Image (cartoon, grey):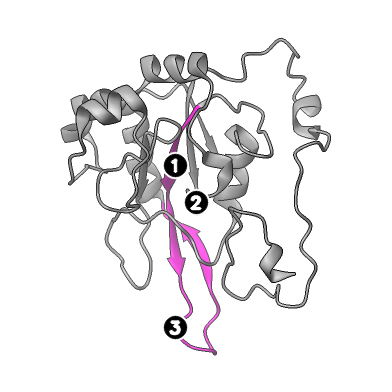
Amino acid sequence: TKDEIAEGFVPFANSDTEDEEIVIPTGDEKNQSLETMNVPKTSNGGAGAFVAILDSGYYMEHTAFANYDNSETFQKASERFNYSDLLAVKDKLVGKPVKTLDEKEATAFGYQNPKLNDGSTFYNLKIPYYYDYGGSNLNEGNDFDVLSTVSEHGTHVASITGANGTYKGVAPNAQLALMKVFFEQIPTNDNMAGGVYATEEDIVEALNDCAILGVDSLNMSL
């Protein structure tokens, strides 16, 4: 039932879940992605890697993007890219942070930012960078809200890449830079359809920031 929806589920516009039975995931299901990609069982799960995802939008509060609970993985992520690293390059970025967090707390403890979209561009050590390059018809300028209400694609791709919650991605220990590069057409009445599209300008801005952040790899499922 609706009351049994697993923690982390986000209802999207036009979804119809009122009368549907919700299946609660256990995490015990076979991970087909790992087999398809021939990931060795001895893999470190992407620990120490920083991966950028350029896509339609992201639900960062999903359990897939929880902070690290393993001390060794946490340490490797902290050494790879932490809040101090972001501050060191922030003035060069298109997606500039406009709010400063407690640097000691963010660096030492993998700060879990309680306020999303507040302009810090830092959510936690799992997602040390996020930004909306695409905007929407309700806010055409760049901003800090990377959630899409009309497309789940970005959340899906980022989860396949690096989910570390109930379900595991191909590289659950990797850090993620979540870059929303799609313009979002949000329905403002019953007669308007929603959708997304990306422009070359927004994609190039994100790619330039990828270079400045020094990500190890990036994904564009455009």
Say whether residue 100 is left or right of residue 3.
left
Q: Position of residue 35 (x, y in %)?
A: 81, 25
* Residue 48 visible in the displayed image: no
The residue labelled by disc 2 is 58
Q: Earlier in the sequence, mark 2 or mark 1?
A: 2
- Residue identifier under label 1: 178
Say whether disc 3 or disc 2 marks the residue closer to the N-terminus: 2
Q: Position of residue 168 (x, y in %)?
A: 67, 33
Is there a contact, CB below 8 Å, between mark 2 and mark 1? yes
**Quarter of the image that includes the N terminus:** bottom right
Residue pointed to by mark 3:
188
Q: Nearer the viewer, residue 20 or 158?
A: 20
- Residue 37, x across and y down, in percent: 75, 25
Disc 3 crowd rating (10 Å Cα; few below 14, some 14-19, many 20+) is few
Amino acid marked by disc 2: Tyr
Above or below residue 148? Residue 189 is below
Residue type, numbered disc 3: Thr
Count the labels in the image: 3
Q: CA distance from mark 1 to mark 3?
A: 26 Å
Per the rendered image, the range of residues in magenta is 175-199
Q: Amino acid at mark 1?
A: Leu
Q: Residue, x 22% and y 26% (percent of image)?
A: 104
Vertical relation: 210 (above or below) 58: above
Q: CA distance from mark 3 to mark 2?
A: 21 Å
- Residue most toward the right? 30
In the image, residue 194 lies in the stretch drawn in magenta: yes
26 relative position to 73: left or right: right
Q: Quadrant of residue 103?
A: top left
